[in-house]
Image (cartoon, grey):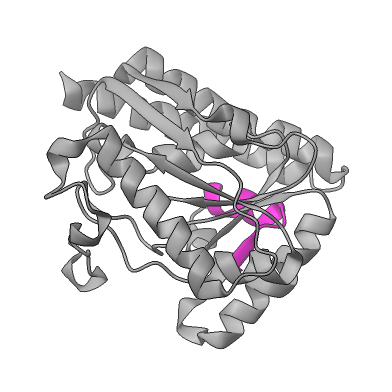
Amino acid sequence: MSFIRSLIYALCFVLLAFILGPLILLARPFPFHKRYKLAVQWPRLLIYLAKIILGIRYEVKGQENIPTDRQVIYLIKHQSAYETLFIPWFTPYPVVLVYKKVLEYIPLFGWAMASLNNIPIDRSKGSEALRQVLRKGSKRIEEGRSPVLFPEGTRTPVGHKGRYQSGGVRLAMHSKTDIIPVAHNAGKIWPGRSFTKRPGLVTISFGAPIKPEGRSSDEIAAEVEHWIESEMIRMNPEDYPSSNPADTPVYSRSKKG
């Protein structure tokens, strides 16, 4: 039954792409806030359909930690596609996504993402990619948008963590913008590399703002990683070897597939 529901959901995803994708592209001449208001209906509908078709519900913890009077940088645990759909429509300010440039080659979906002035990066370019994140990320913050980054760089299986990258932390220091760490357990219900989704409750937890002023990048990065991984253990302790995030196995991209 889960496979059939997942198939129906996938068909709805494609249908929405054919309906909303062209509309978003046609809206390019309009001001950004109007285009974003249209574009954000796409993930909103997909989250709603996930509830109706797949039986995937969500609960939010720490919503009071999200400032409503200023932009922040969201550094998010990456296990699934669910969190990438949830964050854009839930947060108070328009977001700007930092993602792999190859995603823009996906027909309709990728083209729509590119039309919204997000930040595609080519990881193979190393320091140049980081400079691009700092330059464009700071500009988008000035324009009133909140950057979204996945510091692990790739989706990790449940019970694992990736090697946290410093791009989001450096952007926070460069732009003097607070960081909101985000943990969730969507990977248990919507596995990152599985077609079949399972019904259940996704918990999304927002941490308190982390201020970058007067601190080193290593110190901030360690706090971000510790909070996210500790929160992951708190939500689902049965998936981890101990209550110490240092004991969580590190997932290597070379193991993908």
Residue 28, visible in the rendered structure? yes
Quadrant of the rendered structure where residue 19 is? top right
Is 119 inside the magenta-drawn segment? yes
User: Taking 114 as reference, is 48 above or below it?
Assistant: above
| Place of residue 188 in the rendered image (x, y in percent of width and height, measured from the top left) | 23, 36
Q: Nearer the viewer, residue 86 or 167?
A: 167
Q: Nearer the viewer, residue 180 or 146?
A: 180
Residue at 84% in and 57% down: 142
> Start and end of the magenta stretch?
109-120
| Place of residue 204 in the rendered image (x, y in percent of width and height, measured from the top left) | 43, 32
Residue at 48% in and 55% down: 106
Left or right: 113 as drawn, with respect to 202: right
Is the C terminus in the top left, top right, bottom left or bottom right quadrant? bottom left
Is the N terminus in the top left, top right, bottom left or bottom right quadrant? top left
Q: Residue furthest front?
A: 214
Residue 101, visible in the rendered structure? no
Is 116 inside the magenta-drawn segment? yes
Left or right: 156 as drawn, with respect to 57: left
User: Taking 169 as reference, is 200 above or below it?
Assistant: above
User: Taking 234 as reference, is 71 above or below it?
Assistant: below
Left or right: 232 as drawn, with respect to 91: left
Left or right: 56 as drawn, with respect to 28: left
